[in-house]
Image (cartoon, rainbow, N blue to C red):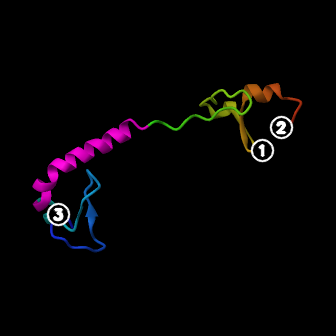
Amino acid sequence: CASCGKSGDDIKTCTACKQVKYCSVACQKAHRQIHKRECKKRAAELFDEALFREPPPREECHICCLPLPFNGAQVIYQSCCGKTLCHGCLYGCVRICCPF
């Protein structure tokens, strides 16, 4: 506990900054004046990290290298090779079961 120094399994983490731990609400309230400024700063950093996190890159068709459409009906998963293809490329490879 950041206030009284206790340790154990029932210690809870500050929900705002996720850095400081307390054993009870009373200890959290007693330590609040000391922790308040640092807590607000860290909470703002965590918010900014979550806000400006880049989304994962979209998958690309393994033939034309264009981003796959969001509509799952326009995408085909080839179970033989584990590749995902767009409908256009699969339509172009009609005679071949799998282009890979």
Compute the Cα span from label 2 to label 1.
Answer: 8 Å
Residue 49 lies in what quarter of the image?
A: top left
Pointer 3 residue? 25
Marks 2 and 1: CB-CB under 8 Å? Answer: yes
Residue lying furthest right: 95
* SS for callout 2: loop
Counting from the top left corner in percent of width and height, residue 38 is at 19, 49
The amino acid sitting under disc 3 is Val
Marks 2 and 3: CB-CB under 8 Å? Answer: no
Counting from the top left corner in percent of width and height, residue 57 is at 55, 35
Q: Is residue 77 magenta?
A: no
Q: Is residue 54 left or right of residue 87?
A: left
Which part of the image, by quadrant, shows the C terminus? top right
Counting from the top left corner in percent of width and height, residue 62 is at 72, 34
Query: What residue is drawn where x is 61% and y is 31%?
Result: 71
For marks 2 and 1, the one nearer the N-term is: 1
Magenta stretch, residue numbers = 30-53
Q: Residues within 10 Å of mark 3 (few under 14, many from 20)?
A: few
Pointer 2 residue? 98
Q: Residue 81 got which mark? A: 1
The amino acid sitting under disc 2 is Cys
* SS for callout 1: loop
Compute the Cα span from label 2 to label 3.
Answer: 62 Å
Counting from the top left corner in percent of width and height, residue 16 is at 25, 50
Q: Residues within 10 Å of mark 2 (few under 14, many from 20)?
A: few
Q: Residues within 10 Å of mark 1 (few under 14, many from 20)?
A: few
Vertical position of residue 86 compared to residue 2: above or below: above
Vertical position of residue 89 compared to residue 4: above or below: above
For marks 2 and 3, the one nearer the N-term is: 3
